[in-house]
Amino acid sequence: MNLLPSRNDLDAAAAIVYGAMPATPQFSWPLLNEALGTEAWVKHENHTPTGAFKVRGGLVYLNRLLQREPGLPGVISATRGNHGQSIAFASRRHGVKATIVVPHGNSAESNAAMRGMGAELIEYGDDFQASREYANALARKHGLHMVPPCHPDLVAGVASYWMELFHGQPALDTVFVPIGQGSGFCAAIAAREALGLRTRVVGVVSSHATGYLDSFRSGELRESPVSTQLADGMACRRPDPGSLELVQRYADDVVTVSDEEVARAIRLYYRATHNLAEGAGAAALAAALRLKHDPRVAGQKVGLPLTGANLDAEKVMRVLSEVLP
């Protein structure tokens, strides 16, 4: 499956996105620049209707799915949060029943948000992969459409935020992209290629979930145990084969950030910009801080997607007070 949409496809997807939400802003914050020692531009995907970038992909995916299958009985997917919220949000707009499977112990506030958007929530399994396998089984049993974590229509929708950033700041030298199941990374590559830019794209994974890094380095798909307590959006045990192919082909590098580094980045975002970032949402900044003396950051113009703000209140209080488990 080709995950790189054409420029025409990206433009068509953007029109769908903007039917439901406006473009999000990008700002260069003086105190962040001071901390990094260079010029950084933050793309504020924490300002979408669901507080995360994923909603763009959900809007495009559901729109195109229902054009192909107008009598669809319902959709189902698995998530740790933002993907599920995007599907629930888009399904409600189209009057389609959505079922979302989450692992046990998932964010209570994320669960509440998905239910609030009208989704039926099912808790199953200890991690995303187990939830995903159960969702697949339910889809087969009940004739529901299984929404995958990475698909060309999801990528085309998500790429709208990268097109906004690259149009606004075409001279970016390096962008850092958190990797969960890969739609964000694939979208960054799609936008860069469509615009003919030479911007470096560096993937970021949790050091407590290194499946994409291990696979990138080895050249073959490798699973990895997941133990992150903060970066739910990067809690991937098994990489998606399609997105992994693009990571291996296009990534300038893949780097890791620990929960402690992510927590520091969340605190810096709040103190320097008064914006809240969830764990994966702060991962790009965490990576840039780790590499601030690296030639890809030092003296360069850097792009940092703040990909989401959906952090439970209890975790917010612990992180901001520097009390970690």
Image (tube, rainbow, N blue to C red):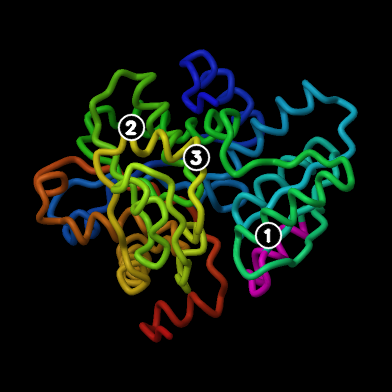
Tell me whether circle 3 and circle 1 mark residues in contact (CB < 8 Å).
no
Q: Tell me the mark number nearer the camera, choosing from 3 and 1.
A: 3
Q: Which amino acid does label 3 sit on?
A: Pro
Q: Closest to the observer: 228 or 55?
A: 228
In the rendered image, is residue 14 in sight? yes
Task: Give the spatial CA distance, label 2 vs label 3.
Answer: 12 Å
Helix, strand or loop under label 3: helix
Residue at horizontal 14%, vertical 49%? 38
Q: Which of marks 2 and 3 is nearer the N terminus?
A: 3
Mark 1 highlights which residue? 131
Residue at horizontal 54%, vertical 50%? 52
Residue at horizontal 27%, vertical 27%? 170
Mark 3 highlights which residue? 241
Q: Does the magenta stretch include residue 28?
A: no
Left or right, 213 with reference to 144: left
Q: Where does residue 246 sit, x and y in percent of width and height?
A: 40, 33
Residue 99: give its label: none
Q: Which amino acid does label 1 sit on?
A: Ser
Helix, strand or loop under label 1: helix
Q: Is residue 106 magenta?
A: yes
Residue projecting furthest to the top = 8
In the rendered image, is residue 42 in sight? no
Q: What stretch is highlighted in magenta?
A: 103-116
